[in-house]
Amino acid sequence: MPQNFQQTISPIDGSVYAERALASSGEIDATLGRAVEAQRKWRRAPMDVRAGICRRMTAYMVEHSEEIGEELTWQMGRPIAYSPMEIRRGFAERAGYMADIAAAALADIEVEPKENFRRFIRREPLGVVLALSPWNYPYLTTVNAIVPALLAGNSVVLKMAPQTALVAERWAQAFAAADLPAGVFQFLHMNHDQAADVIRDPRIAFVAFTGSVAGGHAVQQAASGRFLAAGLELGGKDPAYVRADAPLAAAIDNLVDGACFNSGQSCCAVERIYVHEAVYEPFVEGFVELTRRYRLGNPLDRETTLGPMVSTQAADKVRHHIQDAVTRGAEALIDAKEFDADRPGTPYLAPQVLVNVDHSMLVMREETFGPVAGLMKVKDDAEAIRLMNDSAYGLTASIWTQDADAALAIGDEVETGTCFLNRCDYLDPALAWTGVKDSGRGCTLSRLGFDSFVRPKSFHFRLRLA
């Protein structure tokens, strides 16, 4: 393939689903120039105009969610029974919430009255925002940055992962249908070197990156020569703790889904589970039984509940983690032969449940990003907290108990961006989405999510000279 093209190889059958030319240096320069000019006018648009356009864009996406969902299934392999829900549920919920709260969240901050003075702080847009977004939840990750950035008065340039390149084009179609002024939203198909050059361009005011830890380091390195802020939403190795008083059936149901949905390809997927010894045996039994009900196969079949992973390379990494654990003494409780579609050397991979695991194993230490869960017995809350914190990551953690006070006490000790009680693998748009340690820095969603896309400007007016 020529170096000036990128391809989307479908995990369904290995075919080339899409091929796009990479932007030339002239096209990149022109795109950034249009973004700067368009933002100067867009920042003056009233908030009701900005919010109205974002709502119309969302309505367009929802209206076309079936065709977008099928397109997404071809690009990254999620079962078609679920793909449209990314638009209809999470995308629509987040975009709508941010549009609803934008006026209040971005309003001027009045300070204490002072005679003969008017003093306030205004939130000014930064300028041009570069959004670098991944393939695994391409609409949910992009909406977290694009919508609040635009609502705050910025223009946006989007670069999608090549695996889901068509997502960028769908955004452009939706904004065109919503009558967004030309140049306020644009996209570029670029390789990594081109993206690094754009990060270094002085016309970029902020970088919103979602992806791997290695990718986050690359963004920081590219930005290191400038005083440029970057929001980094990175990986996870998210734990769950099932206490002795947990609602066991509900915990099993939710945690199996949290580990296997989207073939485990989520930064906040549940990857390691610590279970109190009093309920360990029934939990393991129920967890395995429910995992065995998944149907692995062609994601275009509406009966399929577990599709292929995004690539053979991704599946092979998961296979390596499983083999490493077994070699070190873990026991794999599911025979891959139970899943007819499991085929080594392809992206089709059966789910797996591992017991007798410990933190010397890759599957309990590194991000696996696949439909695998390691289950580990613990004797009390203190041991669970210690093990949950024994990680380079800190995105989310879930606690399963009927004692909310105990959950709060545990949550205060766990090093994480989000602490769940009796749920997992969900982003509430009213709450800050953030991580600690190698899970990144910065914040999206909630009222705080606007702060990354604005700078404070103080107005200090003496009304009358003495």
Image: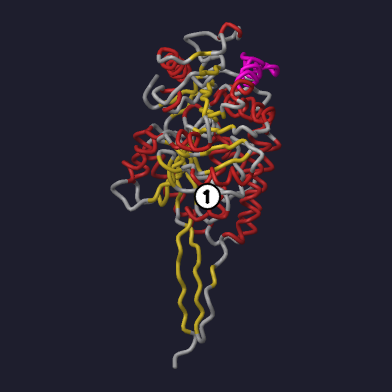
Report the span colored magenta: 284-304
Q: Is residue 52 left or right of residue 411?
A: right
Which quadrant: the C terminus? bottom left
Which one is in front, 122 or 199? 122
- Residue 185 is situated, as x and y percent measured from the top left of the image, at 53, 46
What amino acid is labelled 1 in the image?
A: Val
Q: Is residue 199 left or right of residue 396?
A: left
Identify the image quadrant of residue 74. top right
- Residue behind mark 1: 184
Q: Is residue 356 left or right of residue 88?
A: left
Which one is in front, 140 or 279? 279
Outermost left residue: 225
Query: What is the secondary structure assignment of the residue under circle 1?
Result: loop
- Residue 236 is situated, as x and y percent measured from the top left of the image, at 47, 34
Identify the image quadrant of residue 361. top left
Q: Residue at x 65, y 20 (%)?
A: 286
Up-down relation of residue 76 to residue 100 (above or below) = above
Identify the image quadrant of residue 71. top right
Dominant SS of magenta comes to loop
Q: Is residue 295 magenta?
A: yes
Up-down relation of residue 338 to residue 38 (above or below) = above
